[in-house]
Image: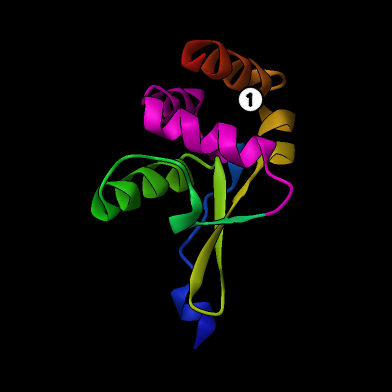
Amino acid sequence: MVADRIPEHPDVRTVPLQQVLEALVDPVRRSIVTQLHDADADIKCGGFNISVSNSTATHHFRVLREAGLIRQHYVGTSRMNTLRDNEINKRFPGLLEAIVTADRVATN
């Protein structure tokens, strides 16, 4: 059943700021967030420009999901990723924009 494959997602209202900041400390995870922020559509796990192994990427996606930053769902056999920007911006106004801006400066 498809519902069995969808991982659990926390209610962003219950995620502590500390957990969100710890998730965003890693440059690979910041890159994932920035790429999702800039995307016109959801991105499948294999569609990101990151230079880590599949198992390491899976770990990064899990950390972001558990921190409430991304939502994952399936389209066919592809696990898709969505930035939960509306929810995060409501809980922590301005945080994502600051992170994305800082990530762009750091990578240029």
- The overriding secondary structure of the stretch rendered in magenta is helix
- Indicate whether 108 appears above or below 92: above
- Indicate whether 79 appears above or below 77: above
Q: Percent from the top left, x then y, of residue 35? A: 58, 37
Q: Percent from the top left, x then y, of residue 33? A: 54, 35
Q: Nearer the viewer, residue 69 or 82?
A: 82
Residue ID at (42%, 34%): 29
- Counting the numbered discs, the total is 1
The magenta stretch spans which residues?
14-41
- Residue furthest bottom in the image: 1
Residue ID at (71%, 29%): 89
Please give the residue where the numbered disc 1 appears in the rendered image: 96
Residue ID at (47%, 28%): 30
Q: Residues within 10 Å of mark 1 (few under 14, many from 20)?
A: many
The part of the image, by quadrant, that contains residue 74 is: bottom right
Q: Secondary structure at mark 1?
A: helix
Determine whether, in the image, residue 51 is placed left or right of residue 83.
left
Determine whether, in the image, residue 13 is placed left or right of residue 65.
right
Q: Percent from the top left, x then y, of residue 4? A: 46, 79
- Residue furthest front in the image: 108
- The verdict on residue 39 being magenta is yes
Tell me, what colour scheme is on the image? rainbow
Determine whether, in the image, residue 80 is placed left or right of residue 53.
right
